[in-house]
Image (cartoon, rainbow, N blue to C red):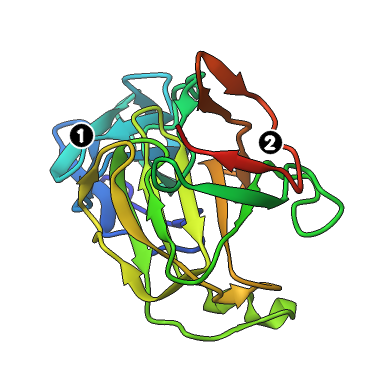
Amino acid sequence: MRFLLVLFILSFFTVDAQELDVTSGAVAIDDGYAYLVTNNEPYPITVKLDLKPNNLKANTSKRVFVVPAHSENFEILQLHMIKRDTYGYKASASYLIGNQTQEPQDFLYHLPYARTASYRVSQGNNSSSTHRGKYAIDFSMPTGTPVHAARGGLVIAVREDQSLGCTKPKCLEYANYIKILHEDGTIAEYTHLMVNGSLVRKGDKVNKDQHIGYSGNTGWSTGPHLHFTVYRPEFSGQNRTIPVRFWLGNSVAAYELQENRHYRKP
């Protein structure tokens, strides 16, 4: 008599608790199970599978898999009976947006606003304020300033329904934003946008320098500005921010933008 399948699915959504339209589970095969994932999102996802098999052996030693966008019943592994006896397993699956099995590229980013425009960096990387221990840049700019993509990619999340902003941490949850997934799995976040300040929607492909929205003063903010950061989601539940280089024209690239300095986009 076979051991009944015992299956626990525990999903972690590591991009600001963004809910994913993803399901996973097992179907019976002749001598075990095939584990399948359905990804209804417009971007690939990375799945980490933690297994506790009983009298079953997986056909691969891998436990981290990439599932393409719009995939139905995508098989990531099979579990086969070791000896003729009862068998089953317990499993937990965790999901990340994008292909997180690769390392970030050394990409040359463009400044996230219109050509010939110049704005002051009000807060830089690892500052003594809200960027402590993080790679992120704040550009001081009036509400309604056009925001442009610093790098091309796929829009994975947009929020533009908030109008509240204040100088207290309690306002953190009210920030409007656009998030764009790059081909190397990193994600750029453009935050504090004005209400109804997005020109793109989830699933849109955008090009570098494309006008994507308008800056604002929503969320936890001490004044109108654009918060720009690039990060990689990780299974720990923490986002690892990535240092980026900006192209400043004339073959000049800046590894570090200095606070209180204006930067003109060539």
Q: Are marks 2 and 1 in contact (CB under 8 Å)?
A: no
63 or 39: nearer the viewer: 39
In the rendered structure, the answer to whether residue 89 lies left or right of residue 239 reads left
Percent position (x, y) of residue 243? 63, 32
Residue 76 occupies quadrant? top left
> Circle 1 is placed at which residue position?
75
Q: Nearer the viewer, residue 180 or 246?
A: 246
Amino acid type indicated by mark 2: Leu
Camera-nearest label, 2 or 1: 2
Query: What's the residue at 20%, 51% (across, down)?
Result: 204
Q: Is residue 118 above or below residue 199?
A: above
Tag shown at residue 169: none
Residue 49 appears in the figure? yes
In the depicted structure, whether residue 243 falls above or below residue 71: above
In the displayed orientation, state which residue is furthest to the right.
128
Q: Name the residue type under label 1.
A: Glu
To which quarter of the image does residue 218 belong? bottom right
Q: Is residue 242 left or right of residue 207?
A: right
Mark 2 — residue?
A: 257
Gap in angstroms between the C-alphas marked 2 and 1: 45 Å
- Could you say which is closer to the camera, residue 92 or residue 234? 234
Residue 161: which quarter of the image? Answer: bottom left
Q: Position of residue 173 (x, y in %)?
A: 57, 76
Residue 154: % across, % down: 28, 44
Residue 106: give x, y in percent of width and height.
Answer: 51, 18
